[in-house]
Amino acid sequence: MSASRPIGIFDSGVGGLTVVKRIEELLPHEEIIYFGDTARVPYGTKSKETVTRFSVENVEFLMGFNVKMIIVACNTASSLSLEFLKRCFKVPLIGVIEPGAKGAVDSTRNNRIGVIGTRATISSGAYEKAIKKLNSNISLYSQTCPLFVPLVEEGWLDEDVTGDVARVYLAPLKKRQIDTLILGCTHYPLLSYAIRKVMGKSMLFIDSAKEVAKEAKGILAACGLLNGTRQRRNTKFFVSDEPDSFVSMGKRFLKRRITAKKMG
Amino acid sequence: MSASRPIGIFDSGVGGLTVVKRIEELLPHEEIIYFGDTARVPYGTKSKETVTRFSVENVEFLMGFNVKMIIVACNTASSLSLEFLKRCFKVPLIGVIEPGAKGAVDSTRNNRIGVIGTRATISSGAYEKAIKKLNSNISLYSQTCPLFVPLVEEGWLDEDVTGDVARVYLAPLKKRQIDTLILGCTHYPLLSYAIRKVMGKSMLFIDSAKEVAKEAKGILAACGLLNGTRQRRNTKFFVSDEPDSFVSMGKRFLKRRITAKKMG
């Protein structure tokens, strides 16, 4: 298997660009093919069956680029569909849940961790399972935050209203005396400021995007698949809806201009 | 064409149930087949091409029930795709824009109308076009409210935060001295209380659901297609994702328990 082949990344939409950003920082010599399923976004409110059907199609699309690894850069798809995808496809597949869980377990001092995510991610219990496997003495407290994604997509990252919504959602977690909080949705790092204002300065945030980039690097290195070139490689973006709004939101995530192509 | 055939209604998800409610009230002897595209909801953030492709598939599904009329109970799909659907299908097709526009034109006293809707509905200019055709002296002021749908779906109909969001969105419209406001999205009637608190007691609200029910009755009567039975008829609900969350949200819209079947 050639190390010069690209890494495939998919997400329900634009959120997975937080993963792209971290991969580009950590692995600047890798080519990336990104697919955002913008015609069917969001996944976080949908069922396991439907998210899995969409995920299979997304992986099939990426396989067309002869990718050497696929990153499921969506917490919902990782929670609901990763196991199924691993059974269906031979390419190395990694999701954001296990790296995020590992990052949280490594970071907590008082064994009390919180996780916030979409309704589908939280109700799947995927973080619970991943954390218990690593350390069964840890208590995990979870909270769904369905309005966080629309707030990010509206660009209201630090409005008063965003702070108010964060206070309502996070109040139950604040009482639990957690010292580590997993941002269990790729959109949430953009709300770090508002979330920190509620949770306090000393709270440790786990950004799954950062954790999954480390995991990807480790696996590629172990398999001898790190790209040996010294050239900076490009990222190509594909979407299932017209690209305009993805491109304009993408700027917010990547802090640079991008172009994207509609698939099919 | 037999008058006992059902009426087909589709929406991107659960919002079109406001239309079902009004049709059931006004036309209790009609059988209704409802389809909510819950696997691909929402439409309001997506492109014309994609919404039209989805709408064609939805109409094809409803045609399988031998419907005598199809109501596009989604402002976004009505704005972007109704003209195309009318060219493709022979069944009478009505959307929510023209009835809503007519209701607003009939109701305004000062010829200043406001409309709120999704990004796709507002940027299509469909309400503008429909209103100008009826009365070119009317000034229309429009505003997108992307967070209103997620707020309704979260069930935050009258929280403080909802009031705050409404104040931010509606402030520009409030300055325009409109006397009539079109609720240009089927979810918005559920936020009437919060919207009225900002816009004032005397503001006339146009609920497209109510207007489209009147329009449907008029057309069926004119074509001799009103169902002659004196029996109360059933409504059947179909969705594209697993039905659980549609069923639980449906209760909020219809104030009764419903069951729904996943299509396919």
Image (tube, coloured by chain):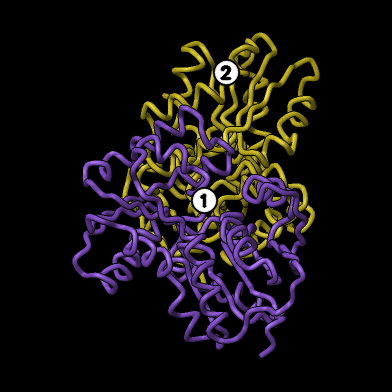
Chain colours: A yellow, B purple
Answer yes or no: is residue A94 visible.
no
In the image, what residue occupies the spot 67% across and 47% down? B255
Q: Name the residue carrying label 2.
A: A171
- Residue B248 horizontal/vertical position (percent): 71, 46
Quick one: SS at disc 1? loop
Kind of residue sitting beneath label 2? Ala
- The number of discs equals 2
The image shows residue A252, relative to residue A234, as above or below, that is above
Are tags 2 and 1 found on a single chain?
no
Task: Name the disc covering residue B241, or none.
Answer: none
Subunit that carries the residue with mark 1: B
The image shows residue A9, relative to residue A172, as above or below, that is below
A73 or B197: nearer the eye? Answer: B197
Quick one: SS at disc 2? helix
In the image, what residue occupies the spot 48% across and 40% down? A18
Q: Name the residue carrying label 1.
A: B187
Q: Nearer the viewer, mark 2 or mark 1?
A: 1
- Residue B138 horizontal/vertical position (percent): 22, 63
